Amino acid sequence: MRCWHDLHSSVGTEGVEMFNTLMYAKKLEEAGFSRQQAEVNVQIMAEIIGDGMVTKEDLREALRQFGTQLEYRLTIKLGTLLVIGFTTMATLLKFWIIH
């Protein structure tokens, strides 16, 4: 029979640390589940939670990517505004100097 630690580490997900597998299994057994049923249920829940968990590192990476994309978009917009501004000024100066 596998121990709870083996079950916890066999899932191999980062988010499982947030899910107390031992406490969950004990509660299932207290509610009438057999040890085997509790183990299977814990493994399934750990996989589900582990797959859907967002870690702090995931959030940092998403924020970094968002910042990079935002910086790129702002650079493009600023460049476009500068080109439009200089073109407008050159056009106005051309008409004022000629007339």
Image: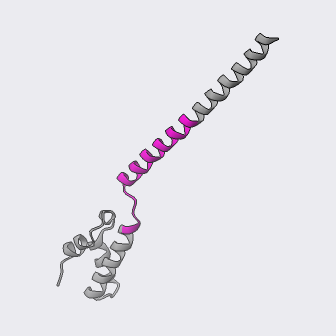
Foreground residue among 84 and 66: 84
Residue 29 placement (x, y as % from top left): 30, 83
- Answer whether residue 57 is magenta in the image: yes
The image quarter containing residue 8 is: bottom left
Among all residues in the image, which is located at the extreme right? 99
Tell me what residue is drawn at x 61 percent, y 27 percent: 82
Q: Is residue 68 shown left or right of residue 46?
A: right
The image quarter containing residue 5 is: bottom left
Above or below, 14 against 21 in this view is above
Residue 34 placement (x, y as % from top left): 28, 89
Foreground residue among 43 and 21: 43
Residue 62 placement (x, y as % from top left): 43, 51
Foreground residue among 28 and 58: 58
Tell me what residue is drawn at x 73 percent, y 21 percent: 91
Q: Is residue 1 shown left or right of residue 97?
A: left
Where are the magenta residues, as a range?
51-76
